[in-house]
Image (cartoon, helix red, strand yellow):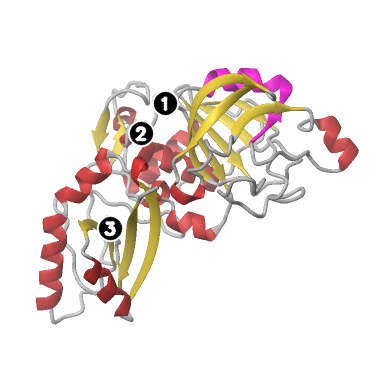
Amino acid sequence: MRALYFILIICLGGFVFCPNTVLADKINGKSTSSQTDVYIKSVYNKLNFNGKRKLKYQVFHKAFYGYLNMLEANKLSNRRYLSICDFSLSSNTNRLWVIDVIAKRVVYNTLVAHGTATGEEFATRFSNIPESHQSSLGFFVTAQSYSGHNGYSLRLSGVDGAYNNKAMSRDIVIHGADYVSRAFIKGNKRLGRSWGCPAVEHRMAGPIIDRIKNGSCLFIYHPTKSYLKSSYWLNNPVRRLPREAKRYNFKTNPNAQNEPALLPGAEEQAVNEEFQEVAPVEEPVDSTVSVVYYSDPTHIAEAKKDKNINVVEIAIPKDQVTPAMKKVAEQRIKTIRKYQKIKKSDKKDKKKDATIVEIKN
């Protein structure tokens, strides 16, 4: 399958001007745009876990950040539910959360299996290769339910590039399994394993599938650095927030323990309502700025020769490149040309990091 390649070029010097664009630093090791952080933190603080195990905030942050990007890209038709598998945890614990984003509550927190070749009690290896019997990382969109040899099941479409885009052809689905149970753990000292599917208890399969089928977001997390640094959904700036974000005072410190204050007269509004653009914020001197450009091959070759530039390639299958991505790229062609001119004429070191995202046909 023909792929488009997103090339991230981290420039250690120079100056970039991005008009009318709100940018968020990468979430791996850095904070994001203040408004995005405050909103994600506020949603997390409002979550009613109903006495169930609490999901780690850093895992929720990544899942919800990607969820917001997928909403903007019109990837989700079932926006109400966000499902999160935390594969950094022992398989003997409840590590699947199904969250009702609108009601701000955890609907289910239950056991979920990983692949036989992914690890024993803990998941350590991941793959997108057919017959690998390993789990895949990243963001998925739920598809249709069906009845197969594993009973009532749910197909999954991987939308995180080379990390999981073969989920459909690999028959990676959510289904019930006898080896996913407390009884199995008691007799074997660990949960049973699948051939790569996020299998759940038989009694939970029906209720979970009926809620999250037909276009909701599933995020399978593990602290694998190569994935976290290159996932499009985790590293693309969030430019639009749900309409309900208008209710919050974005001057609140996102790291504070208390809930961000509601603005006077604000009322509850559902997350699947209309979106608002994120208001412009002043960029700090050492901020990361993103621009996009359709590159010519010689530009990439020259960039790789520069000792001050680090080039990282992210493969995104052509059928997963959305119109929104292309639109952003087309709008920024002039921006990068301006950047190149400024860099050539600028004799002083502005000490600004710049991230150039290039799309190579």
Where is mark 3, residue-wise?
A: 360
* Label 1 residue SS: loop
| Spot occupied by residue 297 in the image (x, y as percentages of width and height) | 25, 67
The quadrant in which residue 295 appears is: bottom left
Residue type at mark 3 is Lys
Q: What residue sits 62% from the left and 37% below the top?
A: 54
Where is mark 1, residue-wise?
A: 79
Viewer-proximal residue, 17 or 206? 206
User: Dot 3: within a 10 Å radius of its alpha carbon, few (fewer than 14), some, or many (20 or more) residues?
Assistant: some
Does the magenta segment cover residue 208?
yes
* Labels 1 & 3 near each other (Cβ < 8 A): no
Q: Decide: is 172 above or below 23.
A: above
* Labels 2 & 1 near each other (Cβ < 8 A): yes
* Label 2 residue SS: helix
Q: Decide: is 319 above or below 225.
A: above
Q: Decide: is 143 above or below 340.
A: above
* Magenta highlight range: 198-212
Observer able to see residue 96: yes
Q: What residue sits 48% from the left and 43% below the top?
A: 165
Residue type at mark 1 is Arg
User: Dot 1: within a 10 Å radius of its alpha carbon, few (fewer than 14), some, or many (20 or more) residues?
Assistant: many
Q: What residue sits 69% from the left and 24% below the top?
A: 149
| Spot occupied by residue 131 in the image (x, y as percentages of width and height) | 64, 46
Q: Nearer the viewer, mark 1 or mark 3?
A: 3
The quadrant in which residue 56 appears is: top right
* Residue 71 circle label: 2
